[in-house]
Image (spheres, grey):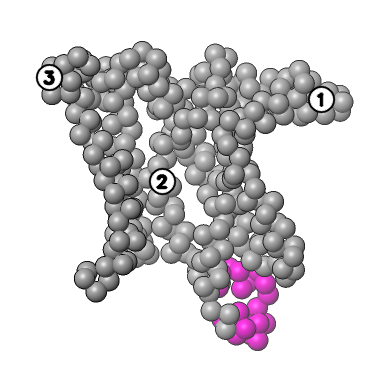
Amino acid sequence: MRRNYDLYLLFLPVIVYYVLFHYVPMYGVQIAFKEFIATKGIWGSPWVGFEHFERFFDSYYFWRLIWNTLGIGLYELVAGFPLPILLALLIHELRSERYRRFVQTVTYAPHFLSTVVVAGIIMMFLSKETGLLNRLMEWAGGEKIGFLTEPAWFKTIFVGSGIWQSMGWNSIIFLAALSGIDPQLHEAAKIDGASRLRRIWHINLPGIMPTIVILLILNVGSVLGVGFEKIYLLQNSLNMSASDVISTSVYRSGIQGAEYSYSAAVGLFNAVVNFVLLVAVNVIARRLNETSLW
């Protein structure tokens, strides 16, 4: 440590960040097992055990919250995870450097839009009265559809817009992994008469498979963490049956209803489930191909 003190100093801000904003706040998790009263503080509030967890499990909307959250999370995983890999493979195979940079710029750009801007674009584009998509459908002789008011469309809109916004940015790590593949493997495959598709299948994909497995484990570990901002911005009373998830329920109960202990219990349940999924998938990945987080 004394010899490499400069590297440890470089790493110090990261350690301080995680300690202050991720580990120190764990002290407050105990309010999930208490009836928190602000005037008495965390230590002075009475202990109630698993009462808030039982209330959540017995609530009328428990299964709706679970299925909506799990449904959106799995939808994002199944539809959104493979596309950055495919995009990275396609960009990697482009021969024109200028065209490659153009495609990268176009696909990366949506990542830098704020969630509020993306939600506004979705509302304007899919509006039943003035939206461009409904105007085109009406011009083609079809009927207008209230995309943002029909629950059946919510998950597709949410996941589709998320893929559009993040697909290019998520492909960066796969492009970095592809750049580390030995070019001599492709040269040898060309000599043997392998086509481009064969080289992608037998060289590129196996070469980035460890990266794919690691990112898949991380994505499965956050399958219930579908976010809050965009769901809340696109949510309304008409699509609530499909858009109400754990994070929005925590917001309503914890912030709007001032039920801090109950919302902490729901959030802790969500975190524990994600942690269990992360550990389980990591164990499975290590046994199948010896690639895992630990």
Main secondary structure of the magenta stretch = helix
Q: CA distance from mark 3 to mark 1?
A: 60 Å
Q: Is residue 63 left or right of residue 190?
A: left
Q: Nearer the viewer, mark 1 or mark 2?
A: 1
Mark 2 lies on a secondary structure that is helix
Q: Is residue 52 left or right of residue 139?
A: left
Q: Residue at x 47, y 64 (%)?
A: 209
What residue does disc 1 label? 135
Mark 1 lies on a secondary structure that is helix
Q: Position of residue 294 (x, y in %)?
A: 29, 59
What residue does disc 3 label? 44
Asked if the stretch drawn in magenta spans residue 221, the answer is: no
Q: Is residue 242 left or right of residue 30?
A: right
Q: Earlier in the sequence, mark 3 or mark 2?
A: 3
User: How many neighbours does mark 3 have within 10 angstroms: few (below 14), some (14-19), or many (20 or more)?
Assistant: few
What residue does disc 2 label? 220
Mark 3 lies on a secondary structure that is helix
Q: Foreground residue, 71 or 222?
A: 222
Instruction: Name the quarter where the N terminus is drawn.
Output: bottom left
Q: CA distance from mark 1 to mark 2?
A: 38 Å
Question: Residue type at mark 3?
Answer: Gly
Q: Residue at x 31, y 22 (%)?
A: 263
Asked whether the residues under the numbered discs 1 and 2 touch, taking CB atoms below 8 Å apart as contact, a structural biologist would say no
Q: Which residues are magenta?
A: 185-204
Q: Earlier in the sequence, mark 1 or mark 2?
A: 1
User: How many neighbours does mark 1 have within 10 angstroms: few (below 14), some (14-19), or many (20 or more)?
Assistant: some
